[in-house]
Each structure stands twice: as C-alpha cells, then as structure tokens.
Image: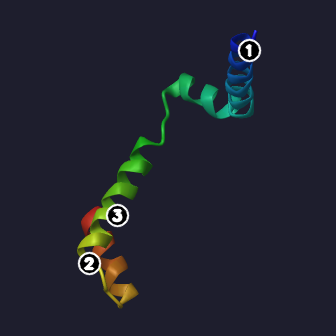
Amino acid sequence: EQVSEKNYDSFMTVAEYLKSHEETILNYFPDRHTNASAESFNAKLKGFRALVRGVRDIKFFLFRVAKLYG
C-alpha cells in the first residue's frame, strides 16, 4: 500500500508539472521550436566571460561580444 501511495504521489507531481507547462511543451510540436540556440549562445557568452575575467570596461566587453558572436 505504501508503494502504491508513493507511486501515486510521484505520478501526481509529474502530472501537475505537465499541466503547468502544457502550453510551452505543446509549443514545440508545430514547428519544432526549442531554445537550443539561446542556450548555445549563453554557453558561448559564459566561456567568453571566463576568458576576459577582470575586464572593467563594459563598452569594450560588449564590443568584443558583438564582434565575436554577432
């Protein structure tokens, strides 16, 4: 009985998640849109920030980002 109750709780957690994200999940299927390109850009930007650690000139930082990834 305890196993059934825990399985039910897990199932309900998944069901609630799917219901709350239904629109986003279903949005993928018509055109196969994902946020992979945004995630890729974020990873590149994070790597670039690691390379230029300590840069104080924000304008220069943004200029370099635009030239490299723009």
Q: Nearer the viewer, residue 30 or 5?
A: 5
Q: Earlier in the sequence, mark 1 or mark 2?
A: 1
Where is 12 relative to 47, above or below? above
Nearest to viewer (mark 1 / mark 2):
1
Q: SS at mark 3?
A: helix
Where is 57 relative to 42, above or below? below
Q: In the image, residue 32 lies at what x, y percent?
A: 48, 27
Q: Residue at x 48, y 36 (%)?
A: 34
Q: In the image, residue 8 lies at what x, y percent?
A: 74, 16
Residue 2 numbered mark, or none: 1
Q: Nearer the viewer, residue 3 or 47?
A: 3
Q: CA distance from mark 3 to mark 2?
A: 11 Å
Q: Nearer the viewer, residue 17 or 69?
A: 17
Q: Is residue 41 left or right of residue 7?
A: left
Q: SS at mark 1?
A: helix
Residue 64 numbered mark, or none: none
Image quadrant in which you'd find residue 20: top right
Labels 1 & 2 near each other (Cβ < 8 A):
no
Image quadrant in which you'd find residue 50: bottom left
Q: According to the image, label 2 marks what residue? A: 52
Q: According to the image, label 3 marks what residue? A: 45
Q: Identify the amino acid type marked 2.
A: Val
Q: Earlier in the sequence, mark 3 or mark 1?
A: 1
Q: In the image, residue 53 lies at what x, y percent?
A: 29, 79
Q: Earlier in the sequence, mark 3 or mark 2?
A: 3
Label 2: few (<14), some (14–19) or many (≥20) C-alpha neighbours in 10 Å: few
Q: Quadrant of the N terminus?
A: top right
Where is 20 relative to 9, above or below? below
